[in-house]
C-alpha cells in the first residue's frame, strides 16, 4: 500500500506520497488532484484511497502546475549552486514568477511560449527593467530545461520566447572631489575601513568583508584578495557565508598596499588583535554585509553627498583610475575583471576628457 495523505495548498487538494530517494532520505512527492477544496473533499478522498490501494496510477509530473514545478525545482537545485545564487532564485520564483503563473493554473505540459512572452510583457509594462526580465527568463528557461531532461516535457517553450534587449549599463560613480569628501566624512564612521578599501581598491562588498589579516603582508606591502563573505536570504532567514571561492578566477589578485590604506590597516590591527577578519565591530565581530550597505546610505545622506550604492565605490575607483590616464588593461587587473572587454564595456564612457584629447589629436593631423 502506498503511504500517502491528503493536503491543501492554495485552495486545491494535493496528495503527498511519502517516499525516499536512493540515499534513504525522505523525499515526498506531490500529486495534483486539480480539485478545488470547496465542495470536493469526498472526491479527493476517493482519489487518495484509489492511489493508496494501487487502483489508480501515480499522476505523472506532466500534470503538475508550472508554479508548483518551479518550487520543486528550487528544492532540487538548492545543493548544486552557490548560496547567493540560490537566494536570488528563491526570491524571484516565490515572489514574482510562481505567483503569476499560479493564478493562470497552467500545468507544465500545457505551458506555451506565448504565455511566457506575455509574462515578460507584463513585467516590462510594470517598469521592471529589461535586464531584470532577462534574469527572469534565465530562471524560467533553466527550470524548464530541468523538466525537459527529466522527460516531463518534450520541448522547452522558453526557447521560443523572446527576451527583451539588454540595457547598456552606465555605472554611477564619484569624481575625485566627491571621493575626497566621502573619505573626510567617513573618517570616524563605523564603516570607515570598508569605505577606504572599496574606494582605493575597487573591491566588491563581499571582498571587503572577506579580507583577512592573513592576506595582508606588511613586510612586502601587499594585499591579496582570496576570500569573500556574502549575506543571503535562504528559507526566510538571513545567512552569512564565507568562501575561498571568488566570483571569477580573475578576482584572485595581489595588489600593492597604498600608504593611506596601510596606515588605516595598522591602526585597525592595533585595536583588533583577536579576529581573523579585518572589518569588524568594536567587539571584534565581523560586520554584516547589510550593515555596511545601510550605514553607507545613511552616511552619504546625512552629509549631503550624491546618492550612490556602496558597490558604486568600485565604479568610482575605476573612474578615478581612468581619469588619471591609467591604461585600461591595468584597470582591468586592479579590479579583477575577467577580460579587458568587460572593463571597456563598463567604463569606456566615463572620461570625456580622454575622448576630447583624442579628438584634438585627430584634428591636428
Image (spheres, rainbow, N blue to C red):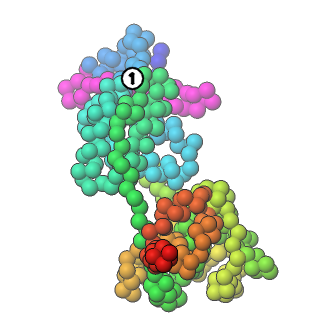
Residue under the image location 56 percent in, 50 percent down:
82
Examine the rendering and report whether any part of residue 292 can be seen: no
Q: In front: 348, or 66?
A: 348
Q: In front: 119, or 161?
A: 161
Q: Residue furthest right?
A: 219
Residue 48 image position (x, y, % from top left): 36, 19
> Is 174 within the magenta?
no
- Quick check: 262 above or below 358? below
Q: How many marks?
A: 1
Q: Residue furthest left?
A: 39
Q: Along the horizontal axis of the image, is 174 left or right of 333?
A: left
The part of the image, by quadrant, that contains residue 229 is bottom right
Residue under the image location 52 percent in, 63 percent down:
344
Q: In front: 87, or 123?
A: 123
- Quick check: 278 above or below 15? below
> Is 18 within the magenta?
yes
Residue 87 image position (x, y, % from top left): 47, 51
Q: Residue furthest top?
A: 55
Residue under the image location 58 percent in, 61 percent down:
340
Residue 122 image position (x, y, % from top left): 25, 46
Q: Disc 1 marks which residue?
A: 62
Badge 1 marks a residue whose secondary structure is helix
Span colored in magenta: 16-42
The part of the image, by quadrant, that contains residue 50 is top left
User: Is the residue marked by circle 1 packed among few (<14), some (14-19), or many (20+) residues within 10 Å?
Assistant: some
Q: In front: 208, or 59?
A: 208
The part of the image, by quadrant, that contains residue 49 is top left
Residue 144 image position (x, y, % from top left): 43, 33
Examine the rendering and report whether any part of residue 343 can be seen: yes
Residue under the image location 32 percent in, 29 percent down:
111
Amino acid at each position: 500500500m502506498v503511504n500517502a495523505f491528503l493536503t491543501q495548498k492554495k485552495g486545491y487538494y494535493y496528495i503527498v506520497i511519502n517516499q525516499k530517494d536512493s540515499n534513504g532520505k525522505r523525499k515526498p512527492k506531490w500529486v495534483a488532484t486539480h480539485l478545488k477544496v470547496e465542495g470536493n473533499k469526498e472526491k479527493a478522498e476517493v482519489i487518495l484511497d484509489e492511489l493508496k490501494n494501487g487502483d489508480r496510477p501515480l499522476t505523472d509530473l506532466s500534470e503538475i502546475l508550472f508554479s508548483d514545478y518551479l518550487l520543486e525545482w528550487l528544492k532540487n537545485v538548492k545543493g548544486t549552486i552557490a548560496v547567493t545564487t540560490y537566494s536570488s532564485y528563491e526570491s524571484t520564483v516565490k515572489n514574482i514568477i510562481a505567483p503569476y503563473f499560479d493564478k493562470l493554473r497552467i500545468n507544465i505540459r500545457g505551458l506555451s511560449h506565448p504565455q511566457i512572452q506575455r509574462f515578460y510583457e507584463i513585467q516590462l509594462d510594470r517598469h521592471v527593467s529589461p535586464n531584470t526580465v532577462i534574469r527572469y527568463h534565465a530562471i524560467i528557461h533553466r527550470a524548464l530545461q530541468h523538466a525537459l531532461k527529466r522527460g516531463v516535457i518534450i520541448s522547452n517553450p522558453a526557447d521560443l520566447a523572446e527576451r527583451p534587449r539588454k540595457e547598456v549599463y552606465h555605472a554611477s560613480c564619484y569624481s575625485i572631489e566627491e571621493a575626497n569628501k566621502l573619505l573626510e566624512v567617513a573618517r570616524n564612521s563605523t564603516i570607515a575601513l570598508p569605505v577606504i578599501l572599496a574606494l582605493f581598491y575597487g573591491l566588491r562588498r563581499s571582498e571587503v568583508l572577506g579580507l583577512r589579516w592573513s592576506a595582508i603582508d606588511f613586510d612586502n606591502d601587499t594585499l591579496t584578495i582570496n576570500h569573500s563573505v556574502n549575506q543571503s536570504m535562504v528559507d526566510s532567514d538571513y545567512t552569512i557565508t564565507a568562501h575561498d571561492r571568488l566570483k571569477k578566477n580573475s578576482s584572485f589578485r595581489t595588489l600593492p598596499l597604498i600608504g593611506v590604506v596601510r596606515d588605516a590597516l595598522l591602526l585597525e590591527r592595533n585595536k583588533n588583535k583577536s579576529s581573523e577578519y579585518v572589518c569588524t565591530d568594536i567587539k571584534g565581530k565581523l560586520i554584516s554585509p547589510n550593515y555596511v550597505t545601510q550605514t553607507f546610505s545613511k552616511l552619504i545622506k546625512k552629509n549631503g553627498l550624491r546618492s550612490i550604492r556602496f558597490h558604486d565605490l568600485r565604479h568610482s575607483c575605476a573612474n578615478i583610475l581612468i581619469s588619471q590616464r591609467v591604461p585600461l588593461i591595468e584597470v582591468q587587473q586592479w579590479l579583477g575583471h575577467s577580460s579587458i572587454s568587460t572593463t571597456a564595456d563598463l567604463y569606456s564612457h566615463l572620461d570625456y576628457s580622454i575622448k576630447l584629447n583624442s579628438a584634438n589629436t585627430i584634428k591636428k593631423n
